[in-house]
């Protein structure tokens, strides 16, 4: 089977490509490299001694999508391509709606025209908004509080309408919580071309000496220690979740909405202390004002993914920290070494 992975050179995309190839799939990648590196795929090929067909282009460009489908028989699509920073989305809503929503519309339209109706969409826990009840399951109300989350929800609702109109589609909406970690080889990991969007890369960069200190956005939340609580999940667990979802979708036409999470909430300070124990480094930090769009806590009930597709997160927080520290030590400047 041949899978098109949009955004496949990115953080989650590259790890999923590795897992797809390991599981016997052929992979075609489309990525505009705006916030990713082709080096990630070169390292996947080095690790697995394999080939990956790569197209540089944007998912909003219908012509390159048509070219890909004309040149390859695509059995299914995993759609990662999109902008992903909550704080940036508040400042640039036009860019986020244009890229995340329009790109998904164009992609699904081309898929339909070529008779490819198996799609896994990279959604987000941000669709739940500021839920007052934990843990969050898939039946909870959705009410995102930032443009990033709203762009994901628009695409989710659109894809549900697509399936309702034509149930020969097989679609999975995978709501990730907080991806962290790296492949245990230390060869691929999280490397943003811009300022990191997530906590863990900042922590690792302080530990390695690339940054002087970390900024913690708020210590006055109603949480165990006042800092934000999140459900951190290893990127390889997320990658394996896509394999399980693809296997399930190929058996029958279904519409799935699943959380990919561990079910455990850890605060910012707990993550920092765990990283300090792994690295042996003291992480300096300052407390600053809360960020617009952030919620106090967010962790999941992952039961449904286990029940329906047989997926369960395996890695613990200490494993995530160990793998990130290995990646950071081997790649102090990311893929630009």
Image (tube, rainbow, N blue to C red):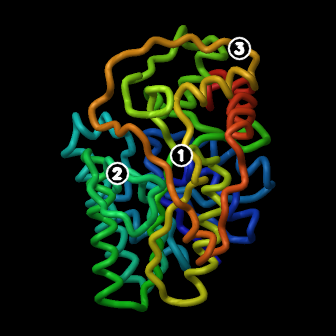
Q: For this view, does 323 lie left or right of residue 239?
A: right
Q: Nearer the viewer, mark 2 or mark 3?
A: 2
x and y percent of residue 306 in the render?
63, 70
Asked if 120 appears above or below 18 in the picture, the reply is below
Query: Disc 1 and disc 3: Cα gap in Å?
Result: 24 Å
Q: Secondary structure at mark 2?
A: loop
Mark 3 neighbour class, 10 Å CA radius: few under 14, some 14 to 19, many 20 or more: some
On the image, the x and y values in percent for residue 328 come to 68, 26
- According to the picture, the residue beneath numbered tag 2 turns out to be 131
Q: Which residue is mark 1?
A: 231
Q: Is residue 100 rendered to the left or right of residue 12?
A: left
Say above or below: 58 vs 195. below
Q: Are marks 1 and 3 in contact (CB under 8 Å)?
A: no
The residue carrying mark 3 is 281
Q: Position of residue 24 (x, y in %)?
A: 74, 71
- Contact (CB < 8 A) between labels 2 and 3? no
Q: Nearer the viewer, mark 1 or mark 2?
A: 2
The image quarter containing residue 273 is top right
In depth, the one of 188 and 50 nearer the eye is 188
């Amino acid at each position: 089977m041949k899978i098109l992975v949009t955004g496949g050179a990115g953080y989650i995309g590259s790890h999923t490509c590795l897992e797809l190839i390991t599981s016997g799939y052929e992979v075609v990648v489309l990525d505009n490299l705006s916030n990713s590196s082709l080096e990630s795929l070169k390292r996947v090929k080095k690790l697995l001694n394999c080939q990956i067909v790569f197209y540089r282009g944007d998912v909003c460009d219908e012509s390159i999508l048509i070219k890909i489908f004309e040149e390859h028989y695509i059995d299914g699509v995993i759609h990662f391509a999109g902008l992903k920073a909550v704080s940036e989305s508040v400042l640039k809503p036009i860019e986020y709606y244009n890229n995340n929503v329009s790109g998904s519309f164009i992609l699904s339209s081309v898929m339909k025209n070529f008779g490819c109706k198996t799609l896994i969409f990279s959604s987000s826990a941000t669709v739940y908004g500021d839920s007052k009840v934990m843990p969050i399951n898939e039946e909870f109300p959705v009410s995102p509080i930032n443009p990033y989350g709203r762009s994901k929800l628009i695409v989710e609702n659109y894809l549900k309408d697509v399936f309702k109109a034509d149930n020969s589609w097989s679609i999975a909406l995978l709501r990730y919580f907080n991806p962290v970690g790296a492949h245990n080889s230390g060869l691929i990991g999280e490397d943003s071309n811009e300022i990191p969007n997530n906590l863990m890369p900042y922590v690792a960069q302080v530990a390695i000496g690339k940054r002087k200190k970390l900024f913690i956005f708020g210590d006055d939340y109603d949480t165990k220690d006042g800092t934000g609580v999140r459900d951190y999940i290893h990127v390889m667990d997320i990658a394996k979740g896509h394999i399980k979802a693809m296997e399930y979708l190929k058996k029958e036409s279904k519409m799935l909405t699943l959380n990919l999470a561990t079910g455990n909430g850890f605060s910012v300070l707990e993550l920092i202390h765990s990283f300090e124990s792994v690295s042996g480094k003291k992480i300096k930090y300052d407390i600053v004002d809360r960020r617009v769009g952030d919620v106090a806590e967010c962790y999941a009930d992952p039961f449904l993914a286990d029940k329906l597709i047989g997926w369960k997160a395996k890695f613990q927080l200490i494993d995530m920290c160990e793998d990130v520290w290995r990646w950071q030590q081997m790649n102090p400047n990311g893929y630009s070494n």
